[in-house]
């Protein structure tokens, strides 16, 4: 079964440092997303991406965040200057549609710890 | 406002049935999804409802009433591996497939 792959699985970084989280969505999917889940809290929407541009972003997705699809396969989330409160599990997801029974396929996540 | 409510935790015995309720008040509706999430892992898709009624898929069934803003996930013949968090999620019709998730219901299956 096709998978969404994320690397790294764990990342520890110092406050103020830049991190790049990487995702390879399912190859025939067109819609890409980043969500995050702070430990013990709900899964929160960060950003959606379609046709090489951001479709929608949440209030969490401020100027410190950016996304990119640098080639035909990778989808990255960059946090420019990490803060302690950015510590969370970050999930990439992809979908073949935005209606009907097209749910997400989530990646296994990157656990980001900011120290 | 946007709100999705589900119980925090439920405990049931192996072989039993558990029903997880979800109520939602959202500005729009384009389908309700249930996901299963084991600790430290990604959510995995379980079910989808967009019309009122019951959808059955093996040991798992999901029900939707749009007029009541209510859904439930029914887990039958519980197995130990069903111990997980179950997330209710509503898709926003006015966005590019954005989901709003409930906080999840932790189901603990005991021997």
Image (cartoon, rainbow, N blue to C red):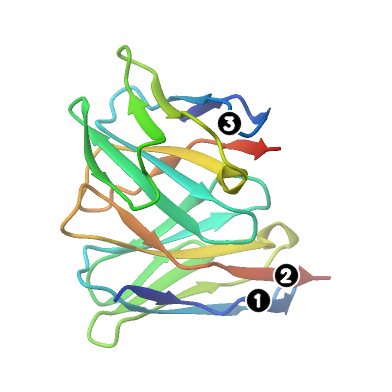
Camera-near label (3 vs 2) is 3
Q: Chain of mark 2?
A: B
Q: Is residue A92 left or right of residue B91?
A: right
Q: Which residue is mark 3?
A: A16
Residue drawn at x 57%, y 41% is A83
Real-space Cα separation, disc 1 to disc 3, in angstroms? 37 Å
Q: Residue at x 34, y 53 (%)?
A: A59
- Please provide percent x and percent y for residue B13: 75, 76
Secondary element at image label 3: loop
Residue A2 visible to an observer of this rendering: no
Q: Nearer the viewer, mark 1 or mark 2?
A: 1
In this view, B104 is above or below B97: below
Do badges 1 and 3 share one subunit? no
**Pointer 1 chain:** B
Q: Residue B7, image x and y in percent?
A: 56, 80
Q: To which quarter of the image does residue B15 belong? A: bottom right
Return the mark for residue B9. 1
Mark 1, other Cα within 10 Å: few <14 / some 14–19 / many ≥20: few
The residue lying at 33 percent from left, 14 percent from top is A70
Q: Residue at x 66, y 61 (%)?
A: B82
Query: Mark 2 — residue?
Result: B108
Discs 1 and 2 carry the same chain letter: yes
């Amino acid at each position: 079964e096709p998978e969404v792959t994320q690397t790294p699985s764990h990342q520890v970084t110092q406050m103020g440092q830049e991190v790049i989280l990487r995702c390879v969505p399912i190859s025939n999917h067109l819609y890409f997303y980043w969500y995050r889940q702070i430990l013990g809290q709900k899964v929160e929407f960060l950003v959606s991406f379609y046709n090489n541009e951001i479709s929608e972003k949440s209030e969490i997705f401020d100027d410190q965040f950016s996304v990119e699809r640098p080639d035909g396969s990778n989808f990255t989330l960059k946090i420019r200057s990490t803060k302690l409160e950015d510590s969370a599990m970050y999930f990439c997801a992809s979908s073949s549609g935005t209606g009907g029974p097209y749910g997400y396929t989530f990646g296994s996540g990157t656990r980001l710890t900011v120290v | 406002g946007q709100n999705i409510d589900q119980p925090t935790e439920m405990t049931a015995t192996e072989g039993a049935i558990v029903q997880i309720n979800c109520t939602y008040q959202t500005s729009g509706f384009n389908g309700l999804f249930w996901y299963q999430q084991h600790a430290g892992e990604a959510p995995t898709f379980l079910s989808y409802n967009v019309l009122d009624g019951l959808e059955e898929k093996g040991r798992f069934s999901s029900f939707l009433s749009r007029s009541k803003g209510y859904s439930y996930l029914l887990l039958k013949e519980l197995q130990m591996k069903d111990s997980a968090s179950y997330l209710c999620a509503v898709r926003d019709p006015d966005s590019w497939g954005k989901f709003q998730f409930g906080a999840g219901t932790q189901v603990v299956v005991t021997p």
